[in-house]
Image (cartoon, rainbow, N blue to C red):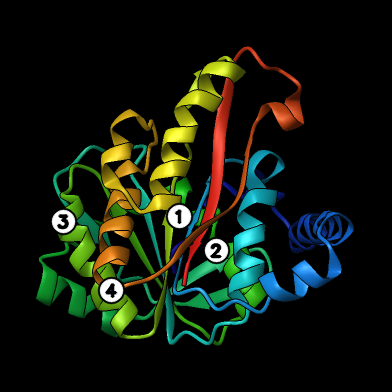
Amino acid sequence: MRKAVVKEWYGGTCEAVTDYIRRFNMILDENVDAEKAKEIFSLKPKALIVPHAGWVYSGFTANFAYRIAQNTKPSSIAVIGPSHKFAFDGISVTLEDSYETPCGILPVNVQLSKELIENFGVQNLEHVHTEHSTEVQMPFIYHYFGNSVPVIEMVYSNYSPEKLKEIIKFLIANNVLVVISSDLSHYYDIKTANALDYNCLEAVAEQDVNKLKNCEACGKIGIEAMILASVEINLASFVVDYRTSADVSGDEKQVVGYMSAIFI
């Protein structure tokens, strides 16, 4: 079993996780027009981009995308995130048979994970999977999909967006919901952060990887790969939320940017 290592980032207990999500959805319901909400929450995305900070900062933004995605019926959910602890060449997939979350255990699709190793040269480096960019997604997945949909956890470091694009296309073709994990700019003042982050938002909305040149994101490889895959398989993309840590902390001198997006 893949044990949780950053439980405090999302409250640590099932009660805390459930309360976070209840509050996120209450805010959504209070601020999104009923007719618009009916339209938004009937969408069935094939892929998401979500942030991965502590839920107090980025949870609302991530939850927005997951709430939309709950209408899908994927065979599995693949969470793909950048490594923050270990530098290595390539991408790794876990072969642990399950994943711990505060509200229950998620099964891992080991068979499909092995296919990724065999067909795409993906590695199995279990030590790199003590990674918060992927872990903080799992409680959302358990909440919205329960334990009936297995997960695939992939962590990359020095890797080609072109290679990751092929993996994403393969996953989507096999009815796997793809979750790309990334935060945006880090520790700039609010004005600079907004300017930098707008490049990322525009690149996703317009599906133009050239606009990523001035985008700062820890998961930029994943974002680029997702855009490339989306263009090739004719998906539409929509940015659903953007905010910064200043929305919670009030500190506009050093902020982190967060975006969520869906691909349909």
Provide residue 80's location: percent of width, then percent of height: 37, 58
When the figure is inspected, residue 204 is found, relative to residue 103, above or below; the finding is above
| Residue underneath mark 2 | 138
Instruction: Categorize mark 1 by other alpha carbons within 10 Å: few (<14), some (14-19), many (20+).
Output: many
* Cα–Cα span, label 1 and label 2: 7 Å
Given contact means CB atoms under 8 Å apart, are the residues at marks 4 and 1 in contact?
Answer: no
Element type at mark 2:
helix
Helix, strand or loop for disc 3: helix
Q: Residue 134 carries which label?
A: 1
- Residue 109, by quadrant, is bottom left
Please report the residue visible at 25 percent of the width from the left and 58 percent of the height from the top: 228
Q: Is residue 143 visible?
A: no
Q: Name the residue under label 3.
A: 162
Mark 4 against mark 2, which lies toward the viewer? Answer: 4
Mark 1 touches mark 2? (CB < 8 Å) = yes
Q: Which amino acid does label 3 sit on?
A: Glu
Say the numbered circle drawn on residue 233: 4
User: What separation in Å lies between label 4 and label 1 (alpha carbons)?
Assistant: 25 Å
Mark sitting earlier along the chain (4/3): 3
Tell which circle, 4 or 1, labels the residue nearer the N-terminal end: 1
In the image, what residue type sits under mark 4? Answer: Ile
